[in-house]
């Protein structure tokens, strides 16, 4: 069974940093791209960042580009999100999600999600 | 970036109703469109991928259609457990985008 468990959230002041982790199990971690998605209070889902299986392709939403860094450690089956220069508007529940593909390997979707870790940015 | 819109933003419906939600993208994404259901306190759940493929374990009352820039999620007969927020999401680019969501309320 695929399991994704996020950790590292908490209360932090604006301008400070936080590092989120996602521990994966139940699948061959280094076979799949991974993503971070967040939901701010009362808002919809917002894609944050994604990373390919070998870290060769990395993307960020414009709202976090230059402040957040995604990484992965395939040996430890872990995904990370280093968040620097945090802003009040980064307050959200952060999910990690695993990509799956259709049977032909073309169409990607986020098939498995963790329960999320809450980040609160406030003074 | 690929922009996405959904309509309506919310709707009220009764158990047994047929519900249709529309998603439109700012550029042609072929069939790289997924639909998710999200309930409070739970992670999102994929319902439909590749515009019209039903995810394993999802009830057959859910269906998806469309290609290019216009897509539809249909619930053929709304059940009590279907009251939730629904999001479309494009995977045409590795920079993913979600639609703003459609909340389905009980009438």
Image: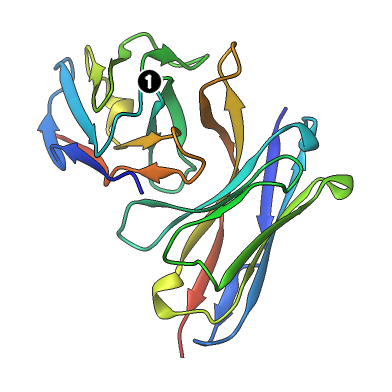
Residue A60 falls left or right of residue B78 = right
> Residue B86 location, x and y as percent?
30, 35
Question: Farthest residue in the top direction?
Answer: B60
From the image, tell me which residue sits under label 1: B31
Quick one: B83 or A85, which is closer to the camera?
A85
Question: Mark 1 Cα within 10 Å, few/some/many (few <14, many 20+)?
Answer: many
Question: Farthest residue in the right direction?
Answer: A75
Quick one: B88 or B40, which is closer to the camera?
B88
For image coordinates 58% across by 47% down, the residue present is A35
Compared with residue A11, is residue A31 higher up or lower down, i.e. above or below? above
- The subunit carrying tag 1 is B
Quadrant position of residue B13? top left
For image coordinates 38% across by 39% down, the residue present is B38
Question: Farthest residue in the bottom direction?
Answer: A123
Residue A53 falls left or right of residue B66 = right
Quick one: A19 or B77, which is closer to the camera?
A19
For image coordinates 44% across by 71% down, the residue present is A91
Q: Secondary structure at mark 1?
A: loop
Residue A97 falls left or right of residue B92 = right
Compared with residue B74, is residue A33 higher up or lower down, i.e. above or below? below
> Residue B21 location, x and y as percent?
19, 28
For image coordinates 75% across by 43% down, the residue present is A24
> Residue A86 location, x and y as percent?
51, 79
Quadrant position of residue B85? top left
> Residue B71 location, x and y as percent?
25, 23
Tag count in the figure?
1
């Amino acid at each position: 069974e695929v399991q994704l468990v996020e950790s590292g959230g908490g209360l932090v002041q604006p301008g400070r940093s936080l590092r989120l982790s996602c521990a994966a199990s139940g699948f061959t971690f280094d076979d799949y791209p991974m993503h971070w998605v967040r939901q701010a209070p009362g808002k919809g889902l917002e894609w944050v960042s994604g990373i390919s299986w070998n870290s060769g392709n990395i993307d960020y939403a414009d709202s976090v580009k230059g402040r957040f860094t995604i990484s992965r450690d395939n040996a430890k089956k872990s995904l990370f999100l280093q968040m620097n220069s945090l802003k009040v508007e980064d307050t959200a529940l952060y999910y990690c999600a695993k990509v799956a593909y259709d049977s032909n390997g073309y169409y990607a979707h986020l098939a498995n999600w963790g329960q999320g870790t809450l980040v609160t940015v406030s003074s | 970036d690929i922009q996405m819109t959904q309509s309506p933003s919310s709707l009220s419906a009764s158990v047994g109703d047929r519900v249709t939600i529309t998603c439109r993208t700012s550029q042609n994404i072929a069939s790289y469109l997924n639909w998710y259901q999200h309930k409070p306190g739970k992670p999102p759940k994929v319902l439909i991928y590749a515009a019209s493929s039903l995810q394993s374990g999802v009830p057959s009352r859910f269906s998806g259609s469309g290609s290019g820039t216009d897509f539809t999620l249909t619930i053929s007969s709304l059940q009590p457990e279907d009251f939730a927020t629904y999001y479309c999401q494009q995977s045409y680019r590795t920079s993913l985008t979600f639609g703003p969501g459609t909340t389905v309320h009980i009438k």
